[in-house]
Amino acid sequence: MGTRVGEAALLLKGIEKRFGLVTAVRGLDLAVAQGEFVTLLGPSGCGKSTTLGLIAGFFPPDAGEIYLGGRHVENLPPFARDIGVVFQDYALFPHMTVAQNVAFGLKMRRVDRAEINARVEEALDLVKLGGLGSRRPLQLSGGQRQRVALARALVVRPTVLLLDEPLSNLDLKLREEMRAEIAALQRRLAITTVFVTHDQGEALAMSDRIAVMNAGAIEQIGRPTEIYERPATRFVADFIGRTNVMPATVGAAGSTQVSLVTVQGATIEVATAHSLATGARALLAVRPERATLATAPVADALSLRAEVTQILYLGASREIHLTLDDGPAVIVDLANDGREPPIEIGDRVWFVAAPASCLVLPA
Amino acid sequence: MSLARRAAGPWRALRWTVAVIYLFMFGPILITAAVSFNASNRSQFPPQGFSLRWWGNALSEEWLEPVLFSLQLAGATAALCVLLGAPLAFILTRQRFRGREVLVALTLGPLMLPALVTGVGLLQFFQYMGLRDYIGFPSLLAGHVVISLPFAVRTIAISLHGLPPNLELAAMSLGAGRARALWEIVVPLAKSGIIAGAVFAFVHSFTDVNLSIFLAAPGQIPVTVKIMGFLEFGFAPTLAAVSVITLIVPLTVVGIMQWLFGLGDFIYGDARG
Ligand SMILES: Nc1ncnc2c1ncn2[C@@H]1O[C@H](COP(=O)(O)OP(=O)(O)OP(=O)(O)O)[C@@H](O)[C@H]1O
Ligand SMILES: [Mg+2]
């Protein structure tokens, strides 16, 4: 990416990090604009925390460059980088009160007493913990500890805010509450943020952009809708949401259109940015909620014969499991629109997807 | 009801076991204490009459001097063990480096050696290295640090193990240098472990006789060694009184530390203090 040093609040160029024989991060490039919320999303062990640790300066990279606010920082220790970090386990200092925890960064910066008090109070109000300053971390609930950790990181007004799975220790309801709150706070303060999670829901809901990581590198980066609607690889398509994937062969390939031949010899014209050669093998992907069922084939849509194998009633939707004739198993989500057409296990049906709902992925 | 009855058997057995253990621990001490109040010249139990003259002997210059000497020695040993042991424990728990195993072996090794062997070794070392003049307090201090350090290091290491390493990283991300993070975060949180380590080193030094017996010098004699020497003349009631004093001193130290810092939290398992 052609971003120059001056433009990005945070810039990583060709970052590599090895731990012994394990390469945790391999050739990672990332540019985060001022005030942007970027999420590193990926499965366990893909190098998200390592990347965050490299930005924070907890260990040096083996190769590559890191710029924070235009400053070249990869040789600087964490305390010289002007960052705020929120850890998964919060890492609150148990021997200090909430107020002392929040004041710590200001104390290290030799801010004078009166200003420290004012800013600590302001920060605690910001995370809705006003009045709890004299408590100890162990006397707080999980959600409250989370807020203290956030206040402690924010009070120093860091160049970037780094959050490593801050919500994963909270129960579901609190998690959803906090993710809305953190996102709102981030927008209000316009603080450049790198957020690590392996929860795609969090990533989609909170981010300006999502960087999907796989095996130490970024597989795709883009706005949540791009990542979800136009995954570039099968890995991304599988990791974010669910995807039905079937084998296909490229028929005629244009510059923006490609004609695919898939199971049962069905042919469909699909828009694509991938350049594919005629005769090449590819994958055809359809999201479960973008497919539907029909009793007869539908013109100008992908229509495949299938048999119903299982029906799961989920309240808001029904999840219909099918097996395509001469093809793989697929899933269709039928939204609960109040009509609920009768479907039985063993029914012969047509699996239908409009061309706009079909995606081409490299095999 | 039936549950309670079934539990009663084992519970009663446990209670009796504990009682017997206490009897074996405190019985001899109580007898010694009783003997020190004997009116007769012989160490008899039950004591014949009541007298404080043995206590008069025990509290004379002759015995107070070695008690004081032992106190100073144990105090210095405890201080040195903490100064050396805390950094050592930190390095051993946090850092992975070449030669770590060797350092562990060197630190904890003296635990496996009889103190007697260490004592003989140190004595020869001081003699052959031309350090004869340092036999006495300096050699005793060196020896006591060697044999007490493992206790301090282990105890401090346990308290460091309980701390998430993220705490230091959090402090550093907030602008604290490495030393500042140690001082503001690690030291206060490991405090009870550090104090417990000092207490263990103190007690271990104060009660040692195996090593001290080789390294004492005239006028620089720990009370335990003095007691050993005195035993050659038989067990006089004076010794009973002295023994009670040497028991009370370390107990008092532990008691004061407990009162000041609440060691129990640490010793009985809650490393967070
Ligand atoms: N300090 C370390 N020493 C050795 N290997 C490490 C270290 N830290 C991370 N690794 C390895 O580097 C790889 C990436 O780890 P990392 O913690 O960055 O993953 P992650 O994406 O944060 O995963 P998770 O979602 O489980 O937190 C893993 O294979 C891990 O085992
Ligand atoms: Mg991680």
Image (spheres, coloured by chain):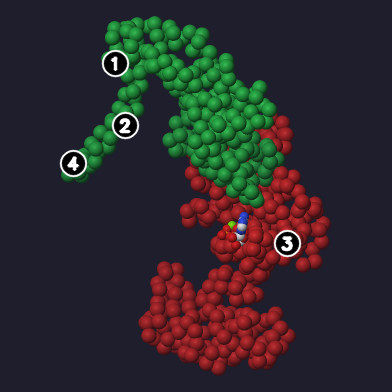
Chain colours: A red, B green
Residue A109 appears at what percent x and percent y? 72, 37
Q: What's the residue type where badge 4 is placed? A: Arg
Question: Chain under label 3?
Answer: A
Q: Which residue is mark 2?
A: B21
Q: Viewer-nearest of labels 2 and 4?
A: 2
Q: Which mark is in front, 1 or 3?
A: 1
Tell me if the residue at label 2 has its CB under 8 Å from ligand 1.
Answer: no
Label 3 Cα neighbours within 10 Å, binned few <14 / some 14-19 / many ≥20: many
Residue A302 lies left or right of residue A218; in this view the side is left
Q: Amino acid at mark 1?
A: Phe
Q: Position of residue A91 (x, y in %)?
A: 57, 45
Q: CA distance from mark 2 to mark 4?
A: 25 Å
The quarter holding residue B233 reads: top left
Q: Residue at x 45, y 34 (%)?
A: B267
Residue A257 against residue A52 in the figure, above or below: below
The mark lying in front, picked from 4 and 1, is 1
Q: Residue at x 38, y 16 (%)?
A: B235
In the rendered image, which residue does mark 4 sit on?
B5
Q: Amino acid at mark 2?
A: Ile
Earlier sequence position, callout 1 versus callout 2: 2
On residue A117, the disc is none
Distance (Cα) linking label 3 and label 4: 68 Å
Of A358 and A108, the residue lying toward us: A108
Give the farthest residue toward the bottom: A265
Say whether residue A167 is visible: yes
Which is more toward the observer, B254 or A136?
A: B254
- For marks 1 and 3, give the CA distance: 80 Å
Classify A189 as above or below B48: below
**Going 70% across and 51% down the picture, which residue do you hit?**
A57
For the residues bearing labels 4 and 1, Cβ distance under 8 angstroms: no
Per the model, the C-alpha gap separating discs 1 and 2 is 21 Å
Residue under pointer 1: B45
